[in-house]
Amino acid sequence: MTLLIMVINHNRLKDKESQTFFFMSLFMLIWVDFAYLARIFGNNTNVSETFLRIAWTATPFLFYTTYLTSNYLIGEKLNKHISFPVFLITVVLGLSAAIGKHVISGVTFTSATLDIIYGDFFFAFMMGIFLIMVATILPVIRKKPSRKVLIFLVGVILFYISNFIFNIFLPVFMDITYLYYLGDYSTILLLAFTTYAVLRHELFDVKVFAAELLTVIIWGVLFTQVLLAADSTQLMIDSAVLAVMVVFGILLIRSVTKEVQQKEELENLARKLKHMDEVKNEFISVAAHELRAPLTAIKGYLSMILDGDAGKITPQAKEFLQDSLLSNERMIRLVNNMLDVGRIEEGRIVYQKGYAHVSELMRRAYTEFRLEAERKQLDLRLEIDKEVEDRVYVDPDRLHEVIVNFLSNALKYTEKGWVALKVSNPRSGWVRAEVSDSGVGITKKEQKKLFRKFYRIRSEAGKTIGSGLGLYVSKLLIEKFGGKIGVESEFGKGSTFWFELPVSKKKS
Ligand code: ADP
């Protein structure tokens, strides 16, 4: 009964599953209570039989509402071709138990045990119940059930099993009727598990209920004391205490309700934020995609003009065009990083894995960026150990992207001095690539946050273009390839960005 009130109280029967659950509990109460009464009034067989009839009439409806609740819980739309026959069976079974002697033909009461004399329709009645059971279980099995539904299902199955054992198998086939009541009480299992399933995700509402229950009990106790007050002084004191408790009780319930409402609001907000985050990611990926095509076209035309395909150009025009080309390259890198983030995070990226030599990729990046370094008058160096073991199993183009991210950052955040690329074996089985610079450097505090999504150092963000995605994407990629990534830096002196990957040995 308490469980029933709890669910009604919980959402004031707003949704379908609690409405059907309410009726399920109601039929359950009718069944259990009247079956109990039938035993109590066992020696008056007429009354007992009437009670039993009521209990048995409620039974098919209990199974029907269990069927409905189960369907709503798994979020399945009712299939009319199934639900209508099930409803029909329910009504026929209910009527047949209520009227005539076809299901229950009579009762006998010997030595404190109630025995039911079954009518000729009894077997059909049981078959009907069995059909409703099957209709309940089938859709649940077909659909992969969630935790919530699983809990409910455990209740239903326990209920069915004990029902089958105590109400059908033992009395019908073994003539053991004195355990019959265990079958009736098994409904409690169904009720308990269902309540748990329904409330599972809204435990806080139970908190409101608990507060309300406690308050009402206290009021009840105090009110009884008022009624039982021995003299007028006692009456006054008790009344005053009751009045104070009424006020405090209301305040208590209000504050708990408010807390629950706030929690619900927070949950809603969190849901909205998550949705907005998804929309934002989608926007980034669409925008990046649309930007890439024109940028690539610009790159192509600029290269053609620089190669002299459009006729002779003056040295100054060439310089301007080279600058444009570099800026364009930067934009392409940025857009690529924007595209990669979504793909990597959602696991949509397809890696073209193969063997690569880190030194070769570093050399390639060095060549690509020499011009940019020259234009900034930076000394770009390449230092590779001759004997270095640097064969790795990665997606070579993606690893190249990481190096490019490091190197373009180093050039971007260095105004004078040098940028160096290094490859070495820090310890056996590992290869380490470093990009160092004599640039602005990064404070210890900032270093910790660098590899986060969209993170840009505030003092730098105004001066340079960037998205704060390069390092984040690099980290995701390196970790995907089984490596480590990091930074060492001193503010004002320069930085070293590095990654280490396991060497894949050549088969000898
Ligand atoms: P972006 O460069 O597009 O802003 P990144 O993820 O590549 O994004 O870098 C994040 C931030 O880390 C940069 O905004 C910059 O402040 C800092 N940073 C990266 N590389 C260096 C470097 N070599 N020297 C100083 N700061 C750097």
Image (tube, grey):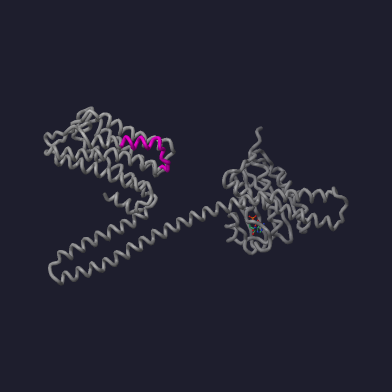
Q: Residue at x 41, y 40 (%)?
A: 78
Quadrant in which residue 74 is drawn: top left
Q: Foreground residue, 127 or 85?
A: 85
**The magenta stretch spans residue 82:** yes
Q: Is residue 74 above or below residue 264?
A: above
Q: Is residue 377 above or below residue 108?
A: below
Q: Foreground residue, 70 or 480?
A: 70
Can you give x and y, in whole percent of width and height, for residue 147 in the image?
Answer: 40, 43
Q: Foreground residue, 450 or 206?
A: 206
Q: Residue at x 21, y 38 (%)?
A: 53
Count of labels in the image = 0
Can you give x and y, in whole percent of width and height, for residue 138 in the image?
Answer: 39, 34
> In which quadrant of the rendered image does the C terminus lie?
top right
For the question of whether residue 434 can be seen, the reply is no
Q: Which residues are magenta?
A: 74-90
**The magenta stretch spans residue 411:** no
Can you give x and y, in whole percent of width and height, for residue 97 in the image?
Answer: 24, 35
Q: Is residue 317 above or below residue 186?
A: below
Quadrant in which residue 55 is drawn: top left
Quadrant assignment for ligand 1? bottom right
Quadrant in which residue 118 is drawn: top left
Can you give x and y, in whole percent of width and height, for residue 236 in the image?
Answer: 18, 71
Q: What is the magenta segment's predominant secondary structure?
A: helix
Q: In the drawing, does residue 233 fall left or right of residue 374?
A: left
Q: In the drawing, does residue 441 fall left or right of residue 239?
A: right
For the question of whether residue 41 can be seen, the reply is yes
Q: Foreground residue, 217 or 96?
A: 96
